[in-house]
Image: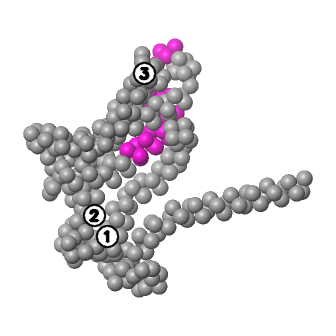
Amino acid sequence: MARTARKRKSATLLLGLLAWAVGLLFVAPAAWMVLTSLHGEADAATNPPSLLAPLTLDGYANFLGSTSGASPIPPLLNSAMASIISTVLVLALSIPAAYALSIRPVKKWSDVMFFFLSTKMLPVVAGLLPIYLIAKSTGLLDSILLLVILYTSMNLPIAVWMMRSFLSEVPVEILEAAAIDGASLPAIFRRIIVPISGPGIAATALICFIFSWNELLFANVLTSTAAYTAPVFLTSFVTSQGLFLAKVCAAAVAISLPVLIAGFAAQDKLVQGLSLGAVK
């Protein structure tokens, strides 16, 4: 028995060390980016990176416009508006759709789910030219409205798949009991479905927000001056004069902060939501 206990303890210790090693492996690129953003350009360009080089905030000062003259506020606001509005629209559309496909399944619901999945099989670049021509003819080029429409369309299939898995976890007996007691469908949604599947809704919203915030291809091609987003602003740091690592890393860290803050704020809901069965 003692030998078996020692083997289990050794196995647990080994798995713990392996988990820490994998975790550090994933964190290492982000840590390198943060460290590089705090160095001068000359120190940031050394190979291997110098960990003991003097630290400076020049990269962040450049990002904030004190040296380059370009303000990051407009692209950050554009990204925030496009990401938040499209996420709200995705939730407003995906929750009723998931309800119809899980709790009260319609006929051939599996075909509907496959249709949603098939929309993600087409490469995004294949639809770029038609979208550009339609946006040009309708006057939507370089507008937040166009980004909201595209981001909503892009994330809706994923959200429906996730929300269907979450709503499938809601006990049907509770819904039937509420219906027998005379509760209307909006009341069932508000008092039963939303509280039970709240973590799943939060997880879906966070993932859709991250996808929208990080999207670059559509924003880079379909916007120019009025609606360009934070990722497009980040690409402006790569100039014909060369790649300035410290400035690019400082801009990348600053632009990633809203996503990191949202992730930390909703990490409990995110873990609970993912454990409900959507991505397992």
Amino acid carrying mark 2 in the image = Leu
The x and y percentages for residue 232 are: 24, 59
Task: Give the colour scheme shown.
Answer: one colour
- Identify which amino acid the numbered label 1 is placed on: Val
Considering every residue shown, the one lying at the far right of the view is 1
Asked if disc 1 and disc 2 are in contact, CB closer than 8 Å, the reply is: yes
Q: Mark 2 points at which residue?
A: 234
> Is residue 164 visible in the rendered structure shown here?
yes
Label 1 crowding class (10 Å Cα cut-off): few <14, some 14-19, many 20+? Answer: many
The percent coordinates of residue 243 (x first, y second) are 28, 73
The label shown at residue 269 is: none
Secondary structure under tag 1 reads: helix
Left or right of residue 275: residue 82: left
Amino acid identity at mark 3: Trp
Crowding around mark 2 (Cα neighbors within 10 Å: few <14, some 14 to 19, many 20+) is: many
The relative height of residue 130 versus residue 78 in the rendered view (above or below) is: above
Q: Distance between the residues labelled 1 and 3?
A: 46 Å
Residues in magenta, as a range: 179-208
Q: Residue at (18%, 43%) from the top-left corner?
A: 129
Q: Name the residue under label 1.
A: 248
Q: Which residue is disc 3 drawn over?
A: 109
User: Is 62 or 161 nearer to us in this picture?
Assistant: 161
**Image coordinates for residue 136, horizontal then vertical, percent:** 11, 43
